[in-house]
Image (spheres, rainbow, N blue to C red):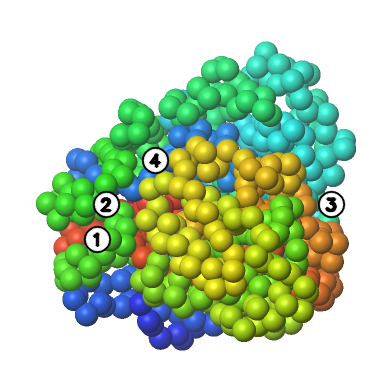
Amino acid sequence: MLIQRKAISRTVVSAIVLIIIVAAAAGAYYTLTLPRGTSGTTSVQTSGGATGLLPTYVPSSKSVDTLAIDEWVWPIDDLNQLYALSELPWPNWLTYTVYQPLVSVNETAEYQQGTIQYLPGLATSWTVSSDGKTYTFNLRQNVQFSNGDPFNAYQVWGQMYGFYYLSGNSSTWLESYNFFDMSTARFGPSTIALMQQSGLINPNSRLMSIMTDSTWPIYVTGPYQIVFNLKSPFVWFPGAFVVFDGLIFDVQWLLQNGGFGTPTSFNSYFNQHPIPGTGPYAVTQVVQNSYVKFSQNQKYWGKSLSAAEIAAQPIWDPGHAANVIVYYKPNNIARVTDLQNKVVHISAVEPSEWPVITANPSFSFVEQPPWAGEVSLLGLNGHVYPTNITAVRQAIVHAINYTDVYAKAYQGLMTPYVGPEYPAWRDFYNLGGVSEYKYDLNLAKQLLTQNHVDTSKFPSLTFNVQAGCESCTNVAEVIQSDLSSINMTVDIHVISTAQYYSPFGSYQTNLQNAQQIGQLAFVNSGFGWSPATLTPADYWVTFVNNASIWGNWPAYSHPTVQKCVDAFTSTSDVSMIQSLCTAAQKQIFDDAPYAWIGLFKLWLPPGGSLVWDHNTVKGFLVDPVWNGQNTGPVFNTVTFG
């Protein structure tokens, strides 16, 4: 879960609305509509002629033998879907193409009109109890995984509890949300052994008695129905299954190939041998750090869908290429050359070669809508001297020249924001209206003086940056220069991806590894961050939660803030949540655990994007969580002209 991109100016016309399609306990369907911010956009053309577009699906009947795509980074944790627990692998090239979601999203409405609409996925529908706490998902029937194993509720049950087990039996195993009372669930190695003995296609009576036990928070009522019993109402619950933990894989095959592994050592066999999915493609070849080849899944349940059905939900498209090859090419010039020479159809282009793209009228690129959730933020470690001093963190956030950061690292293609929320969720964004952290050197010096802080006695601040990220180093150098103005020395350490990520993990992990993390750490090394779910709680439970599984880089926690975080999953009273989060917003502003750098305007590494020749490629869809799951296109939706 990292991220990047850009865009140009646009006009805005429509309101952001969240539409949640659910069903009442009695079975009558209804639509709950909640207003969100404002904005809307269609396209923008650069002065040289390249066109920036919000992604959309363009129907076409033309097919090709091989679709070729150049990607800029090899997936972290390879192709192992078990790491969805930690919002990885990233980028996940198998998103929707191999692994399909339990709940889907109307992506055209999301990107073009700023409307978030939950739609059926592998769950064809769901009902909600009158108290809002019990969600019953009805699953799609007659669906097979690519190896022929049947998809059913037993497989989903096994996946959910497998994640729970791998989390170390954490109550916040589902993307850091404290949804469930797990005290009644006695799931562990003995249950997994029983699953291996019984199988999940036709479970034996012993396993069925466990899976149907309604005292557990997740249980099945039959082969095509699974129930999630929450501790408290959460109206956005379906949004937790749009990507990551909601992408379904074949647990039966997993059990036959070594199982889950352990909480401290996930089964690494699946790194290069991906677990089968139900999607329109299957992986046929993996060459580590080189490419992944996909071929159309001959057992795909959606092969016979009508044009009208695909138009209604394009992510079910069987695909318009018999084969797809996604190449990992770390050299930016090589990726642009491949695109120019028509070696590939779509390519990720980073900032250094962006002028070549914007000068070409045949090229189009993906831009972000203004309500998108990809953010850049700098964690200020409150557990290491001297950033454990509140006044020091406050001085740092005002000593950073954000405009200079935008210009020198992101080509000016970034806008300010106030975290932790992102603008799509207007009802929970910047509650109380605190100001953005603005560049004010006099204020920074004043804060230090008033609090009797002598920076001349400080050690050098450690700022680790991931190797191979041009913009990350640029940002670090700007901040290094800025902090020298308040007599703070910053040592930039460019280290490998493995070294960079090794100390990070849950809130507790980051707390324990505070010294190794250092004083300054860009969340994802400056690449950026996008949501792991489509709910307004996502960034609260990620960045400022003492039960965060992944993303709380500075290990920040405060009782006032935690009350807001906990309220999302403990009450259905939206006014109460907003009141608690308003107090939390002010506390976060005062504590300054993060410098909120900005919102990205383009899709890929800061200042770059996915690029294609619009004379050949007509359209495609992308990640519904704004690059939080995958940087590439959902390639079964790529259409050709």
- Report x, y in % for residue 535: 65, 62
**Kind of residue at badge 3:** Lys
Task: State the image quarter where residue 484 is shown.
Answer: bottom right
Question: Residue 246 or 368: which is nearer the viewer?
Answer: 368
**Residue identifier under label 4:** 74
Q: Which residue corresponds to the image point at 74% horizontal and 59% vertical from the top-left?
A: 388
Q: Which is more foreground, mark 4 or mark 2?
A: 2
As measured in the structure, the alpha-carbon distance from the residue carrying label 2 to the one carrying label 1 is 7 Å
Give how far apart the Cα atoms at labels 3 and 4 are.
38 Å
Q: Which residue has dot 3 on it?
A: 231
Left/right placement of residue 192 relative to residue 86 reads right
Corner quadrant of residue 38: bottom right
Asked if one can make out residue 433 in the rendered structure from this viewpoint, the answer is: yes
Q: Amino acid at mark 2?
A: Asn
> Measured from the top left, where is residue 315 in percent x and y?
42, 52
State if disc 2 and disc 4 touch (CB < 8 Å). Answer: no
Q: State if disc 1 and disc 3 touch (CB < 8 Å).
A: no
Q: Secondary structure at mark 1?
A: helix
Q: The disc labelled 1 sits on which kind of residue?
A: Glu
Q: Position of residue 189 (x, y in %)?
A: 74, 20
Q: Residues within 10 Å of mark 1 (few under 14, many from 20)?
A: some
Residue sticking out furthest to the front: 456
